[in-house]
Image: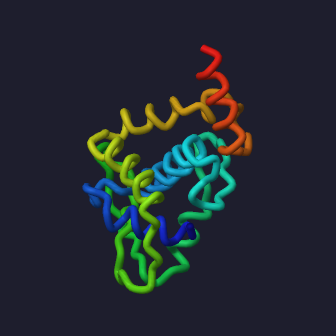
Amino acid sequence: METIDLVRYVIKKYPLPEELSKARLNKIIYLIDWKSAIEKQRQLTNIHWLFNHYGPYVREIESLIIEDPRFKIEQTTNFYGGEKNIITLKDDQSFIEPSNEEKIIIEFIMEKTRRLYWDKFINLVYSTYPIISQAKGSNLDLVQLAKEYKELKESN
């Protein structure tokens, strides 16, 4: 699946669009890729995830949004008064829909995260195996880490 099509689908379907900041969107896509790696032994996107000081994060998603005229980034403030950027769709044309199999994974993650305030949401992200098992600065091979994770679960 092309990352930009996944971004569009998440933005269009996310139940609380006013809460879908760049940071939350980035981490939702990470969670989708992680869930897919566990269940399907492949990511939905071709993103090479990095564990930086903000957890799993890549600039690729923001770059795709900025370069695509079908999206708009609106600057606002978060609950604490800090800067927050919300992504919205200006044009919902010419995107490729995810397959039914992909939709199951995407909607599972959206359902699990939609009611979580930022602190609980970020705790969920930071509790995933790639983050607890790897050092900051690491490249996250989600497919390999999913194999390790499943082996650990089976041995316990």
| Residue that protrudes farthest toward the top in the picture | 156
Please give the name of the residue rendered at 47% of the width and 77% of the height, measured from the top-left corner.
Answer: 96
State which quarter of the image contains the N terminus. bottom right
Location of residue 56 by image quarter? top right
Left or right side of 74 for 137: right
* Residue 145 higher or lower than 8, as above or below: above
Q: Is residue 140 visible?
A: no
Counting the numbered discs, the total is 0
Q: Where is residue 3 in the image (x, y as percent from the top left)?
A: 55, 67
Along the line of sight, which residue is nearer the eye, 76 or 119?
119
Picture residue at 55% right of the left edge, 64% below the top: 61
Placement of 105 over or under 17, stated as above or below: above
Instruction: Residue 15: give x, y in percent of width and height.
Output: 26, 56
Most foreground residue, 80 or 21: 21
At x 59%, y 22%, the residue is 153
Q: Quadrant of residue 139?
A: top right
Q: Residue at x 52, y 75 (%)?
A: 66
Counting from the top left corner in percent of width and height, residue 19 is at 31, 54
